[in-house]
């Protein structure tokens, strides 16, 4: 009998499979590999200080040291390169913001993530930064399509991957185990992104999908840090990614003129350098109402679990919480209550009542 069947090999399924197999588990990952999951278009940014008000992201002190170790380990095991640690530079809007950060940067709360606070322009050739800015560390990006490809080859070499469309109707619960076609396992874990919202096993969870779009641009002159104000401009080996938009209403996979106009307007405010627009992509983030992931075991079917709801910050959330789920499955350790799907069990009870 296998230890697990994982449904979906986007970011969530890849990180969880890698974590469980490295702890000695045996399993199979099923993915239909159509290439339209959120992970295939995501910019892959990890940023410890975010938002208009520049606050430390939730659990940053735990998540950020963990994530670089995780992806570096995965690079070593797979032989692929996908981790790009890179400073993020955020120009100040005015003298007030500059003063505010001169004070805040040395306090213990922010110090691990602040590389430098500049009172004068640091990157004036590329962007508008007359009041200086803040250079963050423990930041960068993961090239997610390459990460997923690397993990897929690693799984294939162990005969632990199958390209197939999982059909929920064919899943059978057999006592403490599950059976799906030729595979019997102790657990099935759903890592199928927004698809979980459409099947009855986990469709009762309150998914709040959010569409996102990115532009690809070619810059006249290469840049060495990630710029972030209004939009981010992220230099990859091929081109720069500019994003992102957030739309709760239009949940189609199509790119839109509205998003392009919005991103170009923000980009023109930030950037001085000339650029050429070379592409645009769209995807749907599997987000949640409280911005915390969905992790845990089904209230009625004990051999069934979920690792999902990674929302806008999958790159930083996935390694830490996959490890927590592995501790839970293998050692019975408690899950963080903020991510445990037990916080929504009353919704399941309403559905079956
Ligand atoms: C435009 C955009 C920009 C983003 N930028 C960032 C960023 O900079 N940083 C960051 O951390 N996050 C970012 N995100 C969010 C990030 O993409 C998500 O948090 C993450 O990719 C979610 O991964 P997932 O594996 O849960 O879902 P998905 O990537 O959607 O993966 C689900 C997988 O399940 C498979 N699947 C579904 N149903 C079935 C089935 N029936 N049978 C077999 N396989 C199935 C799919 O093929 C897919 O591979 C961005 C998202 C978007 C859209």
Image (spheres, rainbow, N blue to C red):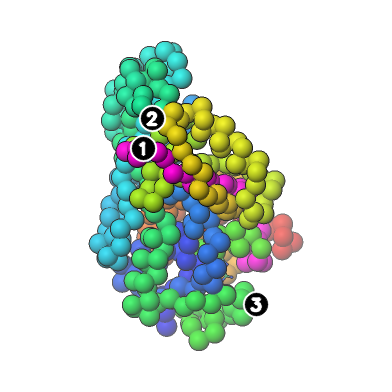
Q: Which mark is residue 199?
A: none
Determine whether label 1 and label 2 are within 8 Å by CB: yes
Please tell me which of labels 1 and 2 falls first in the chain.
Answer: 2
* Vertical side of 211 occupied by 185: above or below: below
For residue 224, which quarter of the picture?
A: top left
At a point 52% along the width and 50% down the height, the residue shown is 279
Residue 295 visible within the image? no
- Tell me the magenta residue range: 199-224
Disc 3, ligand 1: is the CB inside 8 Å?
Answer: no
At a point 60% along the width and 36% down the height, the residue shown is 262
Q: In this view of the protein, which residue sits in the foreground, 58 or 258?
A: 258
* Vertical side of 63 occupied by 327: above or below: below
Residue on which disc 3 sits = 169
Residue 102 part of the magenta segment? no
Residue on which disc 2 sits = 126
Residue on which disc 1 sits = 221
Image depth: mark 2 or mark 3 in front: 2
Image depth: mark 1 or mark 2 in front: 1
Q: Secondary structure at mark 1?
A: loop
- Quadrant housing the C terminus: bottom right
Residue 217 part of the magenta segment? yes
Q: Secondary structure at mark 3?
A: helix
């Amino acid at each position: 009998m296998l230890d697990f069947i994982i449904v979906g090999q986007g970011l969530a399924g890849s990180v969880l499979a890698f974590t469980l197999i490295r702890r000695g588990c045996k399993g199979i990952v099923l993915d239909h590999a159509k290439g339209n999951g959120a992970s295939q278009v995501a910019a892959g940014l990890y940023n410890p200080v975010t938002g208009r008000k520049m606050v430390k992201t939730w659990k940053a002190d735990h998540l950020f040291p963990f994530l670089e170790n995780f992806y570096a380990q995965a690079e070593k095991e797979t032989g692929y390169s996908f981790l790009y640690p890179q400073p993020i530079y955020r120009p100040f809007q005015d003298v007030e913001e500059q003063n505010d950060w001169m004070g805040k940067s040395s306090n213990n709360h922010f110090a691990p993530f602040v590389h430098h606070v500049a009172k004068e322009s640091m990157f004036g050739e590329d962007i508008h930064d007359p009041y200086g800015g803040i250079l963050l560390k423990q930041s960068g990006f993961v090239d997610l399509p390459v990460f997923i490809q690397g993990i897929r080859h690693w799984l294939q070499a162990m005969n632990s991957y199958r390209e197939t469309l999982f059909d929920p109707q064919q899943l059978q619960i057999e006592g403490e185990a599950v059976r799906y076609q030729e595979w019997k396992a102790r657990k099935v874990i759903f890592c199928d992104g927004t698809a979980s919202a459409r099947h009855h096993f986990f469709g009762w969870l309150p998914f709040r999908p959010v569409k996102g779009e990115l532009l690809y641009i070619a810059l006249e002159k290469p840049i060495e840090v990630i710029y972030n104000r209004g939009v981010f401009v992220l230099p990859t080996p091929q081109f720069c990614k500019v994003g992102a938009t957030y739309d709760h209403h239009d949940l189609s996979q199509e790119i839109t003129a509205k998003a392009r106009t919005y991103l170009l307007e923000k980009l023109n405010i930030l950037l001085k350098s000339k650029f050429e627009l070379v592409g645009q992509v769209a995807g749907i983030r599997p987000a949640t109402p409280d911005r915390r992931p969905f992790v845990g075991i089904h209230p009625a079917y004990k051999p069934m679990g979920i690792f999902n709801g990674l929302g806008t910050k999958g790159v930083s959330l996935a390694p830490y919480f996959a490890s927590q789920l592995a501790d839970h499955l293998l050692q019975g350790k408690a899950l963080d209550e903020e991510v445990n799907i037990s916080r929504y069990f009353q919704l399941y009870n309403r559905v079956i009542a």
